[in-house]
Image (cartoon, coloured by chain):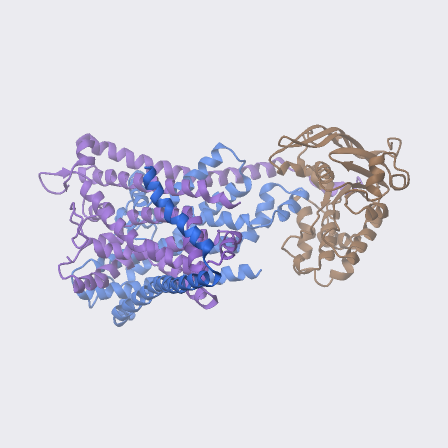
Chain colours: A brown, B blue, C purple
Amino acid sequence: MVNSHSSSILETRNLNIYYGEKKVIRNVSLKVPKRTVTAMIGPSGCGKSTLLRTFNRMNDFIDIFRFEGEVLFEGTDIYRSKTDVTEFRRRVGMVFQKPNPFTSSIAKNITWGPQINGYRGDLNELVESSLRKAALWDEVKDKLNDSGLALSGGQQQRLCIARAIAMDPEVILMDEPCSALDPQSTLAIEDLIHELKQNYTIVIVTHNMQQAARVSEFTAFLYNGDLIEFDETSKIFSHPAEKLTRDYIVGRFG
Amino acid sequence: MSQIEGTVDNPKRALREQDRSMPDKENRAIFAVNAQRRKLKEQVFYYLIFLATLSALFVLVYLIGSIFSDGWPYLNWDFLTNFPSRFPAKAGFKSAIYGTAWLGCLTLFFSVLFGVGSAVYLQELSAKGRLSSGIELSIATLAGVPSIIYGMLGLGIFVRFLALGRSVLAGALTLSLLILPVIIIASREALKSVPDSIRMGAFALGATRWQTVRDHVLPAAIPGIATGVILAMARSIGEAAPLILLGALTYIAFVPESVFDSFTAMPIQIFNWASRPQAQFHDLAAAGIIVLLGFLLICNSAAIILRSRWRAK
Amino acid sequence: MSSKSQLWAKVSPWQRWREELVLRALFICALISVFTTLGIIYILFGESLQFFAHVSPLDFFFGREWAPMFEPRSFGVLPLVSGTMLIAVGALVIALPLGVGIAIYTAEYATGRWQKILKPTLEILAGIPSVVYGYFALNKITPLLQAIYPDTEVFNAASASLVIAIMILPTIASICDDSIRAVPKAVRDGAYALGTRKSEVIAHIVVPSALSGILASFILAFSRAIGETMAVTLAAGATPKLTLNPFEGVQAMTAYIAQVSMGDVSHGSIEYQSIFAVGLVLFLMTLGMNLLSQFIVKRYARKYE
């Protein structure tokens, strides 16, 4: 498959995930290449979000979560390493399905993460550069002290992306970032993703196949907890190797 | 036995047969008679429960009204600034007001510290386990313990064991324990209503649990917590039973100057006046009640305003 | 990239230590509830044990005379228990139909304006301190009773019952209201579709479906009535007596405890210890009832989910 490509930043090896007795991810081995956009698609309940959340250990908050196998970030096993989990979460940012800005001001939304993680640089500079990278600066530069909740849904989501960027992460995980947004805002976010892949590795979960085709270079298709196929997006959408992938892409189920 | 069944069964069967044989018109007539009776029953039922409801309203109006008519003439500046006296004309409420203010401030401090602390621990930080369920069990138990028993606890632990004596501090600690379950339960509800997406957003930025709670969850829950705290405080201000157990005194002609001074409180003074045989003291009690209800009204209005603001958000 | 990462401090041991300290402190806060519960049990049992060193439990639990102050002393708790029960049962008999009636009205009939009046009314009734109710019972209810029935004593169980009925009314009404509202619409619709009237639906369908909540509210209210102190001390008096006549004065358990602690009783004396023995009986009774009501709620609450 894609093992020959440029060096990988995230990797799972023989990963099995259980929620209680239920096995939700079966023996998935996957390498996410650096500075690319990788999309994860599949019908709802296929485990794509679960898989995404192992990359920054957000599954830790689910009581019944259990796993076998390895999850590597730049070659380090993030579940077994002695390094603090908060350190990994700083370097692997995340954007959620529904925009979830903090109730504080726009500026505070950006600076809080860096502050608690001991950022020593200039915070005002950081606010501006992060908002610029998230293509939000021009819209909010005059109201940095307004509540983050006062923004529109699409702006809130870009604020959340800016918040993630401010942490200077190497990877940004996006869990259906456009599912709660209107088409206009979706377009803005997709443009942003194109910009961001110059500097970051992006893994995006989406149930929208067109979106996967538009934004990603690589696509993983999951079905019922199995990784059915992982390849270049162009190949997945034109000549999928598996019949199941083809059926899903032409809309026969899902 | 079979005969009895038969007699019970027979009329039914007869009725059924009658039904079948009866022309439609007559059948409708039967329903119509029945409908009238049912309509009457419906109205009686409605007025009965409406009367029950009115009775509550009436009691409240009468209670407040009679207390005001008894106590209002006695409510003047002297009453508020005099110390208690053997002579009704000279007796005042000053030491009781000061005592309640002292108790209220200290109780607020302890109960918020311990109550919100435990709520945060139980709702945000604890792992589900035997210890947590033990803590929850004791909170549920404490919520139903009569207030006079808290007084016995305070007498045994604070007054005697910790040798705080009959002091304001002992009283405030006892009242704090009394309202602790209320504050814990209300604070947990407020924390529960903070959406999880806020927590997840913070964790994803590499925050620890405490950082997340301190900077995002707790600030979002504060209006709800404050509402619960105020209502709990209103309850503690009106409590007399535990303070009687602690030996709060009634004839105190001074105001507390430190937490180790002895004290009286509004409900204690009211109780003392109400239990005296002379009618004039009863009217003084009514005047005291007006002051106490005034305090409670302020508390409750604050809670209502907070609650409506919070809902609007 | 590597130069940029110098801007980020590593998590220092000091920071971790501080976080740990905060967690420990909060944990200790949470433990206070456990210590309070244990403290209550320890105090009540500890002092009671000393009491039972002087008075046989048999005499205490089955004795029919309570005379702790005068010689010959007698420590039979039954008159106190019966005084409490007379008052509490009386209160429940009055509050029960009223409370359920109010709950039905607020949940099923009341429209905007009434809703706006009733909820605060009940909240205010619930928020009035019990010493105020005691004053009300002694100064307003008792004269009223004496006007109706002249043999009524100045201190009597009936006025205490009446005033406690008012106090527990909000508890009953609000819990019943909740459980009536919890009966799903589909259940009512099924009945309405048969052409039943509203009162019939309420009496035959809604109230039976909400019965567990209603029952739980009674038990909870009963436990409140038993634990109530100031109103019974002021209104019912201080004469321990085995009687069923509500117009006589009786002494409730709580009133005895209050009476002793207002007097000058020295620590370690038998009177001092006796209040803890009575307190233990009170504690066990209320605890039992609270557990029962919790059990009922847990057992039946999830019926519709």
Looking at the rendering, in which quadrant would you find the N terminus of chain B? Answer: top left
Where in the figure is residue C246, as x and y percent of width and height?
19, 53
Where in the figure is residue B247, as x and y percent of width and height?
25, 48
Where in the figure is residue A6, as x and y percent of width and height?
87, 35
Relative side of B118 to B50, left or right: right
Query: Vertically, is C262 above or below C52?
Result: below
Task: Look at 33% across and 62% down and name the residue there.
Answer: B292
Looking at the rendering, in which quadrant would you find the C terminus of chain B? Answer: bottom right
Relative side of C218 to A146, left or right: left
Image quadrant where residue B78 sits = bottom left
Relative side of B197 to B66, left or right: right
Q: Is residue B5 visible?
A: yes
Query: Vertically, is C197 above or below A218?
Result: below
Q: Residue furthest front?
A: B21
Where in the figure is residue C276, as x and y percent of width and height?
25, 39
Q: Is residue B263 visible?
A: no
Q: Residue furthest bottom?
A: B73
Closer to the camera in the image, C222 or C72: C222
Image quadrant where residue A135 sits = bottom right
Task: Look at 29% across and 57% down and name the residue there.
Answer: B267
Q: How many marks?
A: 0
Closer to the camera in the image, C214 or C185: C185
Query: Vertically, is B104 above or below C223?
Result: below
Task: Look at 62% across and 32% down and name the residue there.
Answer: A20
Task: Look at 45% across and 35% down and name the residue there.
Answer: B134
